[in-house]
Image: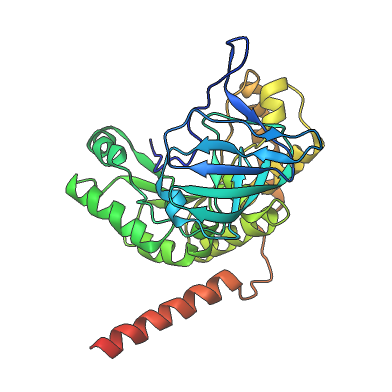
Amino acid sequence: MDLAGPKIRTSNIEIHGKKGKAKEGISIKKGEHIILTKRATSGKESKFGKNKEQLEKAEIGVVLHEIIDDMNINDVVLFDDGMIKAVVIAKEGDDAELVITNCYKNKLSSRKGINLPNTKLNLPALTESDIENLPFICQHADIVGYSFVRTGQDVEFLYRHLDKNNAENLGVVFKIENKEAFENLPQILLSGMKRDKIGVMIARGDLAVEMGFERVSEVQNQILWICEAAHIPVIWATQVLENLAKTGIPTRAEISDAAQGAQAECVMLNKGPHISEAIRTLKDILTRMEAHSFKRKGALRALNVAKNSMAELREAVKTRSAKV
């Protein structure tokens, strides 16, 4: 079972046109300014003049108001799995003004995900709903997925709640799906290893959006290497053989990607009408790859994510020693 954590999304958009028909999204384009707001709003579209100058800014609400407080000027804001990219250019009261810098869709709809890769969010890793669900999870699940984990403190927070529910044997999977979680991975693992039954999921969908698609291959390998050094099993996840599962025909690229999954201890498939064929294909690929090698040995050079974590740990030790 999963602990989803806070969901950062656009609020409901419902704009009534001249004919009375409601639209559940707003039209957008590159260079347009929009307002992201805490205020209750059903959304508003931009208005442009005859010379295409913007006369009124579009307006969109957010489900979690706290993200507006945490945003800073020049922070990047990504909507709808990175299909729309914007930058914060101003803040005032309940509003943040954004300019659209890249746009691969011409519409932003209700309840679409928001990623903030440069923003330090002051959000709890567990929501009140997650905490309410924990007694049921601890009673019925074998493994719990921790979706919004970002720091070692988040791990300790979850462990305290598991102890309250006498769930010392519950397995925990830390889902690495944002930039902050990746950068704090060593601390997450050090805190996590206070229990035996733990694992890591490389949640490549959100991770690619947050880190940039050009970096996701490097980042997923770094996670594999760090977890191998720590003897922690890894789940290779998101879009594995997705085209095959959905259409019955795989792409060449996803066959190569599935073969890379042999480096992990577990590979996750998403649902689709052809899932049985996807499972048979994946089993064949992994069986063939495992016959050639056990994992893959890298150069094991020092990783920046590990260097930075050790520097932070040393600084924390110095601070504690000084206080003593």
Of the pair 265 and 132, the residue shown nearer to us? 132
Q: Is residue 180 visible in the rendered structure shown here?
A: yes
Q: Position of residue 151 (x, y in %)?
A: 41, 61
Give above or below for 271 relative to 151: above
- On the rendered structure, is 34 left or right of 140? right
In which quarter of the view is residue 32 placed?
top right
What colour-coding does the image apply? rainbow
Tell me residue 268's x, y (percent).
56, 37
Residue 294 appears in view: no
The tally of labels here is: 0
Q: Residue at x 35, y 83 (%)?
A: 317
* Drawn side of residue 171 relative to residue 224, left or right: left
Q: Quadrant of the N terminus?
A: top left
In this rendered view, identify the residue nearer to me: 80 or 160: 80
Tell me the quarter of the picture where residue 275 sits: top right
Q: Quadrant of residue 205?
A: top right
In the rendered image, which quarter contains the C terminus?
Answer: bottom left
Q: Position of residue 59 (x, y in %)?
A: 55, 37
Looking at the image, residue 79 sits to the left or right of residue 62; the answer is: right
Q: Nearer the viewer, residue 51 or 257?
A: 51
Q: Does 191 sit above or below residue 268?
A: below
Q: Residue shown at 40%/66% (left/top)?
A: 190
Considering only vertical position in the picture, is 321 above or below 92? below
Residue located farthest toward the top when viewing the structure as drawn: 19
Is residue 317 or residue 128 the one in the foreground? 128
Q: Is residue 185 above or below residue 3?
A: below
Q: Residue 127: x and y, percent?
A: 32, 43
